[in-house]
Amino acid sequence: MYARVTQFDVDTVAISVEAALLRFKDLVLPELRRQPGYEGALLLRTPEGKGLLLTYWSSESAARATVESGFYAAQIGKFLTFYRQPPGREHYEVVLRDLPAATIPTPGGTEGPG
């Protein structure tokens, strides 16, 4: 398994972190799920808009194919006017994965099964 890590810094004057998350869920996540070899994502953020997006891929070639095909650039472009600086990108081999059972925050701020 491989992971691509995208580091980002959202301009919270241009868009709130909540609106950026909704935009990601609506515009990017459905497209990611259609990519061959996609195995999930983990999104981390601060209230100030800094964050990391980890996407998991079945192979190194699957992870790199989305960059070579232009898919990655097209998804980054959906946020182009909302970044303080261009996002960074790295690819890693996943050598240990120990994640808790998936939970999804609900609108009320509590976590539920997901």
Image: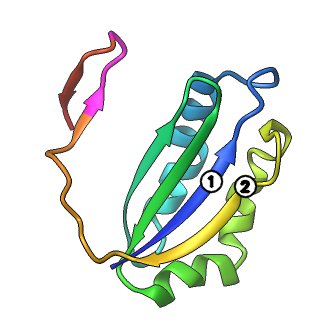
Q: Which residue is mark 1?
A: 7
CA gap between label 1 and label 2 equals 5 Å
Residue 24 forms part of the magenta stretch: no
For residue 42, above or below residue 96: above
Query: Is disc 2 surrounded by few (<14), some (14 to 19) or many (20+) residues within 10 Å?
Result: some
Instruction: Provide residue 96's location: percent of width, then percent of height.
Output: 24, 71
- Mark 2 and mark 1 in contact (Cβ < 8 Å)? yes
Element at label 2: loop
Q: Which residues are magenta?
A: 104-108
- Residue in front for this viewpoint, 34 or 41: 41
Q: Position of residue 5 (x, y in %)?
A: 53, 63
Of helix, strand and loop, which mostly describes the magenta segment? loop
Circle 1 SS class: strand
Residue 69 drawn above or below residue 26 = below
Q: Is residue 58 left or right of residue 82?
A: left
Q: Which mark identifies residue 87? A: 2
> Which amino acid type is marked by label 2?
Pro
